[in-house]
Image: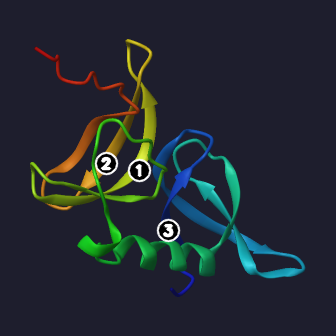
Amino acid sequence: MAKGKYIVHHCGHCDRDARMELIGSAENQPDRSWYRCTRCRHVSLINLEELKREIEVAKKKLERTDAADYEPGKTYRVGEAIFHTDWDDIGKIISKERTSGGGSAIVVSFERLGERRLLENVAIDPEPQE
């Protein structure tokens, strides 16, 4: 990734993906540069090599063998790959949220379906015995 005048990066100050303007290199840190958010003008020190590695990992195709089957009763980690058997789609967990009822949900970016919210760590009642 060549150093250009602008990059698109997540600004921690305005909490958005924004265009960042190169304003200079960091002293004693040749692998890092200072960038300014064009929205809020907040300045960040960004390592372009690390950013390039993160982009390559994000582009890597998810494999079915590397993904765990989704079950509402399980607990998951951000970054983990899951396979939803009903939808026959594989996705990566991008964040966790609290539901309005106090439960836990995961936000999953599926390859075909896009972004979906799924419950996690749900107590499943066994079927009633007759």
- Residue 67 lies in quadrant: bottom left
Give the amino acid at mark 2.
Answer: Val
Q: Nearer the viewer, residue 99 or 21?
A: 99
Give the amino acid at mark 3.
Answer: Ile
Looking at the image, is mark 1 or mark 2 earlier in the sequence? Answer: 1
- Image quarter where the C terminus lies is top left
Residue at image coords 52%, 53% = 10
Left or right for 54, reference 35: left
The nearer-to-camera label among 1 and 3 is 1
Looking at the image, is mark 3 or mark 2 earlier in the sequence? Answer: 3
Can you identify the residue that label 1 sits on?
Answer: 94
Residue at image coords 63%, 46% = 41
Looking at the image, is mark 1 or mark 3 earlier in the sequence? Answer: 3
The location of residue 42, given as percent across then percent down, is 66, 47
Q: Label 1, label 3: how many angstroms apart (C-alpha)?
A: 22 Å
Can you identify the residue that label 3 sits on?
Answer: 7
Q: Secondary structure at mark 3?
A: strand
Can you identify the residue that label 2 sits on?
Answer: 108
Q: Secondary structure at mark 2?
A: strand
Q: Is residue 64 above or below residue 18?
A: below
Q: Nearer the viewer, residue 76 or 78?
A: 76
Label 2: how many Cα within 10 Å (few below 14, some 14–19, many 20+): many
The single residue placed furthest to the bottom in the displayed view is 2
The location of residue 19, given as percent across then percent down, is 47, 58
Left or right for 62, reference 25: left
Residue at image coords 34%, 72% = 66
Label 1: how many Cα within 10 Å (few below 14, some 14–19, many 20+): some
